[in-house]
Amino acid sequence: MWALFLANTGSVVAGTIMFLLLAAAAIVFVLALRSLGISGDHPWIQRLATRPWRDGRDVLKLGLRHLPEVFIVTPNGALLAPSAVELRMNPGDLASLTEMMDLGLINSSATDVYEDQISAHAVELASAGPAEVSVIGDPAVPAGRYRLRQGRPPGPAHPAAGAADFCGRRTTADLGGAPTVAGLKAAPTAEAGSLTVTEPVQIPLLRLVTRGFTAETRISGARAGRGGAVELRLPEVSTVSRVHASFRFADGQWRITCLGRNGVTLNGAPLAGEQVISDCDYIGWGSQPDAMVSRVEIGWSMALPSHPEP
């Protein structure tokens, strides 16, 4: 913009003044929008962040080109490649992609591209096991955009039998996602003379898997719903409130409390007050028989911050 003003005015001083005035006007405009309650979560801003000219294939190609952004830089300057990577895109873009190609084939092709990039950069894997790329739908990602992040490392296959899933329950059409980490243990304590030293309490990762889409947090007091200001974003369904439930971590366990008018069920039973949730529990977002269901995953696997598209 400064070069454009300079070319039009023919004066460095005039061009610089016009540029500063434009910058000041932009700052005032942004402050005015925030004073009106229009932030990054507002539908208008989300619509501006979309790239409607891109379909699912375009988003996938763009995301695969930027897979090296998830490489980890060690203190000595070396690079490490996470063994599991999540490429998140808008559910609409993912739906258009899966109409043309099976999701398993998409993940396999993305993994091949990631392995080629690891070899091209001569990078070692950060953990044992094969590399894996998972393409996941995420309502928080605007249409036409993508986000890259480190995912959950692939683990050994669970010896499931029949139609039962890895949680030992029957498979539900609404559920999907990767196997969860095994059960958790309370923080250990050590005796030091007459004093008991307790290790600092860490909050395990809480993940909700809903129709193949995931939302996760380590924040005690996190809220779940379809609104833009919640920590656990759920798909846009009319029976889901903007703020439908809250999750609190206390005494080594995650607990859920219903905040929505349509109610919550836990493993098929209506939720009353605050109740403890465990790995592989099912949460129903509403009291109706066909209410949307989320599977609970609780584990200690760390995730890197998201890498949004430039």
Image (tube, helix red, strand yellow):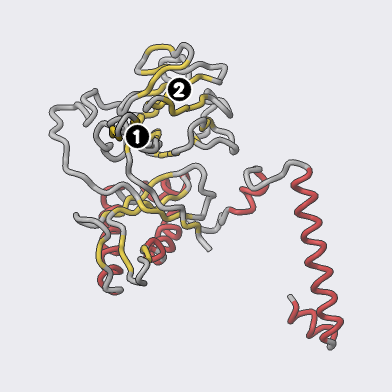
Question: Which of 10 and 219 lies nearest the eye of the viewer?
Answer: 219
Instruction: Give the side of residue 245 with respect to residue 150, left or right.
Output: right
Q: Earlier in the sequence, mark 2 or mark 1?
A: 1
Task: Residue at 26%, 52% (x, y): give it.
Answer: 105
Q: Give the distance between the C-alpha atoms of the residues marked 2 and 1, in whole angstroms.
A: 29 Å
| Label 1: few (<14), some (14–19) or many (≥20) C-alpha neighbours in 10 Å | few
The one of 289 and 226 positioned closer to us in this rendering? 226
Label 2 or label 1, whichever lies nearer to me, is: 1
Say the numbered circle drawn on residue 197. 1
| Label 2, residues with CA under 10 Å away: few <14, some 14-19, many ≥20 | many
Q: Is residue 106 visible?
A: no
Question: Residue 187, position in %: x, y?
Answer: 32, 33
Image spot of residue 251 (x, y percent): 39, 25
Which of the pair 182/193 is nearer the observer?
A: 193
- Residue at 66 percent across and 49 percent down: it is 45
Label 2 amino acid? Ile
Q: Residue at x 32, y 37 (%)?
A: 299
Residue named by callout 2: 256
Q: Quadrant of residue 10?
A: bottom right
Q: Image quadrant of residue 20?
A: bottom right
